[in-house]
């Protein structure tokens, strides 16, 4: 099946890991120092290199600098505890994952099930680049503009690792598509991808839904329930609108990320969990921390690898490609292809797109339905060119004194924008770049 080299100075620990690896069908060798590891690799290139960080003759990380030696092996670090520093180190040195010592059979099984030679990953990356040049697609994303090229480069870099990713960007800009692409390009692609909108689940149910519960743990709990962490085992869990998660649950989430275990509501027995977390928010995380909506320690634990999705107005060059993509998608579903006229593309290019790519898809769906012929004109497309709500077309502005608390600024901006758009909540949410659910939550807080 494959060959593994365990680089560990503790003889008992090395033998135990070698036995676990052998039980999974791998041949195994051990090395107790960097010098011994180099000799073993020269004798037989391992498919998997399990590398302790502390060795008698130096730091295990130094071996990763020897690309000619270890470049053809999957590298997994072994460490005494999961930490933000370990995640960053693993990413910086190109390690695919890390194991928490003492290594458990369940942990190791998950790692071994995802072993992929770096050469295979490089081939997949090359194929993706070719597909991008040919079709303008990269995984679930569409676009060739420079902002999107930066996103693709980041995804390709982080997907092959296990570190947590924090995706930010306006509502409708494609954060979940980024998360799905990260999953599909990762070693976890054959395991579940589960998406959870933390702002759409009732506060009374969110803990049970995410962490699970035991039978009889509360009124109505008639059976044991596996939460999203258990159901996504081995795969990826996408936590959207993370700033909408209640503070008490943020503490519990932090504990799961740091210990690798999850505890169901009503249980005292922790369950091991092997899940890659991708979080997202349409709010500025730093502002969310300052406003108390996001715990600072959780933010730093999630924000190991930040990705910011660009709004559609900053990538207008992708409009023709996106329009063609969505019209083909709609045509395949509805049974008839339609194209956009030059006038339609011109109209679309003038619009500000407060709802971003999601709004574009909805606009094209409506225009498709309303157009009788094969060519979509500009008749059913948006006619008003929207402007920034803090500086309206009527000259309206919002002035805030220096030193005003961020929470107060947010309140003033939301209420002023709502008034600017005549109390139209959907349009207000789109202009502010937040979900309708988030807007309703804020208005409820303000008593409006």
Image (cartoon, rainbow, N blue to C red):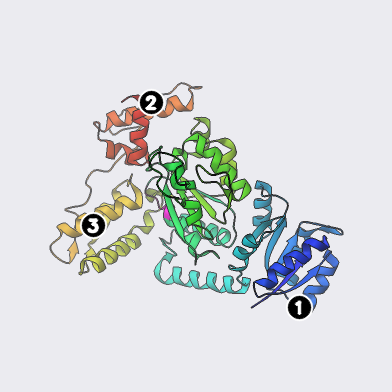
Q: Nearer the viewer, residue 65 or 9?
A: 9
Q: Is residue 442 above or below residue 60?
A: above
- Residue at image mark 1: 44
**Position of residue 323 measured from the top left corner of the image (x, y, whole percent):** 30, 60
| Residue 71 in which image quadrant | bottom right
Q: CA distance from mark 3 to mark 1?
A: 57 Å
Real-space Cα separation, disc 3 to disc 2, in angstroms: 34 Å
The quadrant in which residue 75 appears is bottom right
Q: Residue at x 42, y 62 (%)?
A: 140
Q: How many numbered discs?
A: 3
* Picture disc at residue 365: 3
The residue beneath circle 2 is: 412
Dividing the image into 4 quarters, which one contains the C terminus?
Answer: top left
Left/right of residue 47 with respect to residue 199 in the rendered view = right
Q: Percent from the top left, x then y, of residue 288?
A: 49, 35
User: Visible in this render: residue 73?
Assistant: no
Q: Earlier in the sequence, mark 3 or mark 1?
A: 1
Q: Residue furthest left?
A: 372
Label 3: which secondary element: helix
Of callouts 1 and 2, which one flags the residue occurring earlier in the amino acid sequence?
Answer: 1
Q: Nearer the viewer, mark 3 or mark 1?
A: 1
Q: Is residue 193 magenta?
A: no
In this rendering, would 266 be left or right of 173?
right
Disc 3 residue crowd, few under 14, some 14–19, many 20+, Cα 10 Å: some
Disc 2 residue crowd, few under 14, some 14–19, many 20+, Cα 10 Å: some
Q: Which region is colored magenta? A: 172-176
* Residue at 30% from the left image edge and 53% from the top image edge: 360
């Amino acid at each position: 099946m494959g060959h593994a080299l365990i680089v560990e100075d503790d003889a008992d620990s090395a033998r135990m890991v070698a036995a676990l690896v052998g039980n999974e069908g791998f041949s195994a060798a051990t090395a107790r120092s960097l010098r011994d590891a180099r000799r073993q690799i020269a004798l037989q290139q391992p498919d998997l290199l399990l590398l302790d960080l502390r060795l008698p003759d130096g730091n295990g990380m130094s071996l990763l600098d020897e690309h000619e030696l270890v470049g053809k092996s999957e590298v997994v670090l072994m460490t005494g505890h999961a930490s933000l520093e370990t995640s960053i180190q693993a990413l910086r040195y190109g390690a695919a994952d890390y194991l928490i010592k003492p290594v458990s059979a369940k942990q190791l099984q998950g790692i071994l099930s995802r072993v992929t030679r770096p050469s295979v990953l490089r081939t997949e990356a090359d194929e993706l680049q070719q597909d991008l040049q040919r079709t303008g697609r990269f995984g679930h994303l569409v676009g060739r503009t420079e902002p999107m090229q930066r996103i693709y480069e980041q995804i390709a870099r982080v997907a092959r690792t296990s570190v947590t990713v924090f995706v930010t960007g306006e509502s409708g800009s494609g954060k979940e598509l980024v998360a799905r692409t990260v999953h599909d390009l990762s070693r976890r692609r054959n395991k579940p991808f589960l998406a959870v909108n933390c702002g759409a689940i009732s506060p009374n149910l969110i803990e049970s839904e995410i962490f699970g519960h035991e039978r009889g743990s509360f009124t109505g709990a008639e059976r044991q329930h596996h939460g999203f962490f258990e159901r996504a085992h081995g795969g990826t869990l996408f936590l959207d609108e993370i700033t909408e998660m209640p503070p008490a649950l943020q503490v519990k989430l932090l504990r799961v990320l740091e210990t690798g275990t999850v505890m169901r509501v009503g249980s005292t027995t922790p369950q091991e969990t092997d899940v890659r977390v991708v979080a997202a928010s349409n709010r500025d995380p730093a502002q969310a921390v300052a406003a108390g909506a996001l715990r600072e320690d959780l933010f730093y634990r999630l924000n190991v690898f930040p990705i910011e999705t660009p709004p559609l107005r900053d990538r207008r060059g992708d409009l023709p490609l996106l329009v063609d993509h969505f019209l083909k998608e709609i045509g395949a579903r509805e049974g008839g292809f339609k194209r956009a006229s030059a006038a339609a593309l011109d109209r679309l290019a003038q619009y500000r797109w407060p709802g971003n790519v999601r709004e574009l898809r909805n606009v094209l769906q409506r225009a498709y339905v309303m157009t009788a012929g094969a060519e979509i004109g500009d008749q059913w497309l948006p006619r008003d060119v929207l402007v920034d709500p803090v500086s309206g077309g009527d000259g309206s502005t919002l002035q805030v004194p220096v030193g005003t608390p961020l929470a107060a600024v947010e309140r003033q901006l939301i209420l002023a924008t709502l008034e600017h758009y005549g109390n139209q909540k959907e349009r207000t949410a789109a202009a502010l770049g937040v979900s309708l659910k988030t807007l309703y939550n804020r208005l409820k807080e303000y008593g409006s």
